[in-house]
C-alpha cells in the first residue's frame, strides 16, 4: 500500500508525468504505508478468488484495519471496481483516471521492498496467474456448456456444407437423370440414391427393393425405375460416374458425422441443462445457451430477454422506427409456438419464455441435475395450449412445482441406500442416512418427511 499527501485524485494524475522518470522522484511523492506478504501460494490464490467474486478476504480486511485507522480522512484508490464498496468506514474510488497511477506503481513497487527482487515477483505472479486460470477453466469444463456451444456451431456449419454439396450433386446428376430430383427432392435420400444407382442405366427392376429401402415408399421407387427407362438426360462416361460416386461417398460420411454430432449434443445437454432440454428440445436449448454465451449468462436473463433472444436486429429496428416489437426470437423454433393459433402465439411465447427462465436457473444453480422439473414445466405449457384452445383451466404453478419437488425428492431418496421404507395409503415416510438435515414437503394428497 502506497500513500500520497495530495488532496485531489486529479492532482495525483497530473503529477505522474513529472515523478515517473525514475524511482527516486516517484518515492518522494508516494510513500510506502504498509506491506504484508502472503503466507503461501494457496493463501494468495484464496485472496485472488475472493476479489474476483467481489468479496473481501479476512486477510485484506485485517490489513486495511491495521493500516487505515483514520479511514474518514483517506481516499482509497483500488484497481478493481468490485472492491470499490469493500468498506463502509473507508471512502473508496476506482475511477479510470487512476489507471496510469497503478501502472507506475506496478513498475516501481519492487524497489520499495528490499528483499523482493523483480525476478521473484515475476515468478510469483506467473504462478498465481496459472493457478487462478486453471481454477476458472476447470469450472467451465465441469459445466460443459462450452461443449454445447461449439457443437451447435459445428452442426450449423455442417448443415450449410451438406446443403451446398447436395445442391452441387443435384445440378450435376440432373444433366444425366433430371427426373430423379422431381421424384425425390429430399437431399439426404437423393444423395444415397445417386451413390447407389451411379447411372440411370443401372436403375433396373432388380434394384427396386434397394431403392425402396432408402426412400421407404414403393410407389416412388417404381416411379424412379419407370422414369429411368424414358429419361431425357444425356449419357455420362465412366469417369463422370466415378467422380460422382466419390463425391457422394464423402457426403454420406458427412451425413453420418452430422448424425453422431447431434447425438453427442443431446447426450451433452442431458448432463448440462436437462430441464431446459426436456422443455424446448435440444437444438433450441443449445442455440439459447450459445447466443447467451454460457448457461450462467442465460440463467441471469429475465424471461422478457429470453423471449426475444436472437431477434435483436428486429427489436432495435422497431425501437428506432417506433414500430411493433418482435414477439419471439429463437424460441419461435419450439414446437409450442408452431402449434399455437395465430392470435395466441404472443401469449404462449411469453409463457414459454418464463418457463425457460425457471428451467435454466434450476439447471445452472442446482446441485442435483435431473429433468423432472423440465417434464412438469413442459406439461404446464401443454396445459396452457389446451386452455387457449378449449378454455380448460390448468393447474396452478404452485401445484405443479409441489408435485415436481416431491418427485425429485423421491428420486434422490431411492437412488441412495435406504435404511427403511414404510408406505401407508395417504402418507409415505422414508428414512435415509445421507445428510444431517430434516425437511418436509407437503402437497394436497401426499406428505413426505425425509430424514437425511
Image (cartoon, helix red, strand yellow):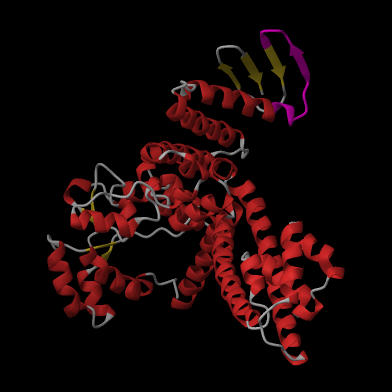
Q: Does residue 282 lie above or below 246 as drawn?
A: above
Residue toward you, 304 or 301: 304
Q: Which residue is drawn at 12% across and 61% down?
A: 8
State the image coordinates of residue 102 (x, y, percent, origin top left): 29, 68
Specify whether residue 418 is painted magenta. yes
Q: Which residue is drawn at 63% across and 56% down?
A: 265
Residue toward you, 200 or 401: 200
Is residue 79 found left or right of 206 in the rendered image? left
State the image coordinates of residue 226 (x, y, percent, origin top left): 75, 69
State the image coordinates of residue 127 (x, y, percent, origin top left): 54, 68
Q: Which residue is drawn at 20% across and 58% down?
A: 320
Q: Does residue 171 lie above or below 450 as drawn?
A: below
Q: Tell me if residue 184 can be seen.
A: no
Q: Tell me if residue 47 can be seen.
A: yes
Specify whether residue 98 is painted magenta. no
Q: Does residue 437 lie above or below 171 as drawn?
A: above
Q: Give the range drawn in magenta.
A: 413-427
Residue toward you, 10 or 420: 420
Give the mark count.
0
Q: Residue at x 29, y 60 (%)?
A: 33
State the image coordinates of residue 80 (x, y, percent, origin top left): 33, 58
Q: In which quarter of the image is the N terminus?
A: bottom left
Residue 351 figure quarter: top left
Outermost front residue: 230
Is residue 96 found left or right of 6 in the rendered image? right
Q: Quadrant of the C terminus?
A: top right
Residue 186 figure quarter: bottom right
Residue toward you, 250 or 9: 250
Amino acid at each position: 500500500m502506497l500513500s500520497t499527501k495530495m488532496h485531489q485524485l486529479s492532482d495525483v494524475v497530473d503529477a505522474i508525468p513529472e515523478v515517473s522518470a525514475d524511482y527516486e522522484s516517484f518515492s518522494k511523492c508516494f510513500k510506502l504505508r504498509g506491506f504484508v506478504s502472503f503466507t503461501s501460494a494457496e493463501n494468495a490464490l484464496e485472496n485472488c478468488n475472493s476479489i474476483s467474486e467481489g468479496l473481501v478476504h479476512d486477510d485484506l480486511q485485517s490489513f486495511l484495519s491495521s493500516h487505515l485507522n483514520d479511514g474518514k480522512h483517506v481516499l482509497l484508490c483500488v484497481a478493481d471496481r468490485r472492491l470499490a464498496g469493500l468498506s463502509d468506514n473507508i471512502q473508496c474510488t476506482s475511477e479510470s483516471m487512476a489507471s496510469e497511477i497503478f501502472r507506475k506503481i506496478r513498475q516501481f513497487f519492487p524497489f520499495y521492498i528490499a528483499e523482493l527482487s523483480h525476478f521473484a515477483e515475476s515468478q510469483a505472479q506467473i504462478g498465481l496467474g496459472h493457478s487462478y486460470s486453471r481454477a476458472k477453466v476447470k469450472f467451465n469444463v465441469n459445466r460443459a456448456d462450452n461443449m454445447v456451444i461449439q457443437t451447435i456451431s459445428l452442426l450449423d456449419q455442417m448443415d450449410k456444407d451438406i446443403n451446398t454439396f447436395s445442391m452441387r450433386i443435384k445440378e450435376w446428376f440432373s444433366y444425366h437423370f433430371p427426373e430423379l430430383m422431381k421424384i425425390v427432392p429430399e437431399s439426404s435420400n437423393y444423395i444415397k440414391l445417386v451413390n447407389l444407382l451411379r447411372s440411370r442405366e443401372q436403375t433396373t427392376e432388380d434394384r427396386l427393393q434397394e431403392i425402396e429401402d432408402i426412400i421407404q415408399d414403393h410407389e416412388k421407387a417404381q416411379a424412379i425405375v419407370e422414369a429411368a427407362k424414358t429419361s431425357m438426360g444425356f449419357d455420362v462416361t465412366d469417369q463422370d460416374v466415378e467422380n460422382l460416386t466419390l463425391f457422394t461417398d464423402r457426403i454420406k460420411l458427412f451425413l453420418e458425422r452430422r448424425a453422431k454430432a447431434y447425438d453427442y449434443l443431446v447426450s451433452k445437454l442431458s448432463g448440462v441443462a436437462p430441464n431446459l432440454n426436456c422443455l424446448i428440445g435440444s437444438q433450441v436449448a443449445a442455440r439459447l445457451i450459445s447466443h447467451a454465451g454460457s448457461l450462467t449468462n442465460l440463467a441471469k436473463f429475465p424471461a422478457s430477454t429470453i423471449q426475444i433472444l436472437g431477434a435483436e436486429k428486429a427489436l432495435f429496428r422497431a425501437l428506432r422506427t417506433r414500430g411493433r416489437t418482435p414477439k419471439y426470437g429463437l424460441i419461435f423454433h419450439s414446437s409450442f409456438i408452431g402449434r399455437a393459433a395465430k392470435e395466441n402465439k404472443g401469449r404462449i411465447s411469453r409463457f414459454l419464455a418464463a418457463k425457460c427462465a425457471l428451467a435454466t436457473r434450476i439447471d445452472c444453480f442446482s446441485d442435483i441435475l435431473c429433468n423432472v422439473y423440465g417434464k412438469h414445466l413442459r406439461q404446464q405449457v401443454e396445459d396452457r395450449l389446451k386452455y387457449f384452445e378449449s378454455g380448460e383451466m390448468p393447474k396452478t404453478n404452485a401445484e405443479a412445482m409441489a408435485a415436481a419437488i416431491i418427485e425429485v425428492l423421491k428420486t434422490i431418496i431411492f437412488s441412495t441406500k435406504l435404511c427403511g421404507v414404510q408406505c401407508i395409503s395417504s402418507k409415505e415416510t422414508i428414512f435415509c442416512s445421507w445428510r444431517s438435515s430434516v425437511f418436509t414437503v407437503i402437497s394436497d394428497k401426499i406428505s413426505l418427511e425425509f430424514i437425511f
